[in-house]
Image (tube, helix red, strand yellow):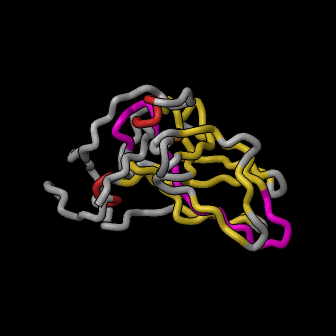
């Protein structure tokens, strides 16, 4: 299977984005120090009509940038818009979209105007698509840590969410980590 790194290292080739210009090799780092299961921990929270689920941050290969993934569900009848986000250990959190196919594959762009969540629907942020880019965390994020995200919605307001940093290997569908 294709191994998708949580950072958008490929994007720096083609577009000017908020992403840090790092040259990350596509090899998993065998230094995880947690005993996460094959699926790893996930964060979730529910505020008003907004439910956040399956939230996680794959342990970044670069200390400068990480990507947060989660699913936003609106159980109400009006929908909402995820306008922006802030994060505790990061100086910047940007909503971005990565193109997975076509000439723009692997490139990223900021989502202007926010991310619309349809009424009684859901939007998934995940590898190869929408993501929340965390830039310049105060310290390198490692598996087992928790990152606090504050997601600002147009209608619901601010939703605070604790997101676990998960091992790269646990998200690569392997549990053959040595040393555990
Ligand atoms: Cu990005």
Left or right? Give the position of 179 relative to 13.
left
Furthest-left residue in this view: 179
Q: Where is residue 127 in the image (x, y as percent from the top left)?
A: 46, 53
Q: In which quarter of the image is residue 29?
A: top left
Left or right? Give the position of 173 relative to 116.
left
Q: Quadrant of residue 120?
A: bottom right
Looking at the image, residue 51 lies above or below residue 92: below
Q: Which residue is drawn at 59% across and 38% down?
A: 109
Is residue 138 something that shows in the picture? no
Q: Which residue is drawn at 58% across and 46% down?
A: 97
Left or right? Give the position of 166 relative to 135.
left
Q: Where is residue 123 in the image (x, y as percent from the top left)?
A: 64, 62
Q: Position of residue 41 (x, y in %)?
A: 42, 63
Furthest-front residue in this view: 103
Task: Indicate yes or no whether the magenta region holds residue 74.
Answer: yes
Quadrant including the N terminus? bottom left
Q: Nearer the viewer, residue 59 or 124?
A: 124
Q: Nearer the viewer, residue 47 or 119?
A: 119
Looking at the image, residue 40 lies above or below residue 130: below
Looking at the image, residue 140 lies above or below residue 79: above
Q: What residue span does the magenta drawing correspond to?
A: 60-80
Left or right? Give the position of 146 relative to 35.
right
Looking at the image, residue 121 lies above or below residue 25: below
Q: Which residue is drawn at 59% across and 40% down?
A: 87
Q: Position of residue 112 (x, y in %)?
A: 72, 40
Is residue 169 something that shows in the picture? yes
């Amino acid at each position: 299977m294709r191994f998708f790194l949580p950072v958008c290292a490929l994007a720096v080739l083609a577009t000017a984005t908020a992403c840090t210009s790092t040259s990350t090799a596509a090899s998993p780092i065998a230094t995880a120090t947690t005993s996460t299961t094959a699926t790893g921990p996930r964060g979730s929270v529910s505020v008003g009509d907004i439910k956040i689920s399956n939230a996680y941050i794959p342990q970044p290969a670069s200390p400068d940038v990480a990507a947060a993934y989660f699913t936003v569900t609106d159980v109400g009848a009006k929908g909402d818009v995820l306008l922006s986000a802030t994060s505790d250990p990061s100086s910047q959190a940007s909503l971005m979209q990565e193109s997975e196919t076509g000439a723009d594959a692997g490139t990223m762009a900021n989502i202007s105007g926010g991310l619309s969540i349809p009424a009684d629907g859901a939007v998934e942020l995940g590898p190869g698509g929408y993501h929340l880019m965390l830039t310049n965390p105060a310290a390198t994020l490692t598996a087992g840590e928790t990152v606090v995200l504050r997601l600002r919605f147009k209608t619901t307001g601010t939703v605070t969410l604790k997101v676990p940093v998960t091992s790269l290997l646990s998200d690569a569908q392997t549990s053959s980590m040595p040393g555990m």
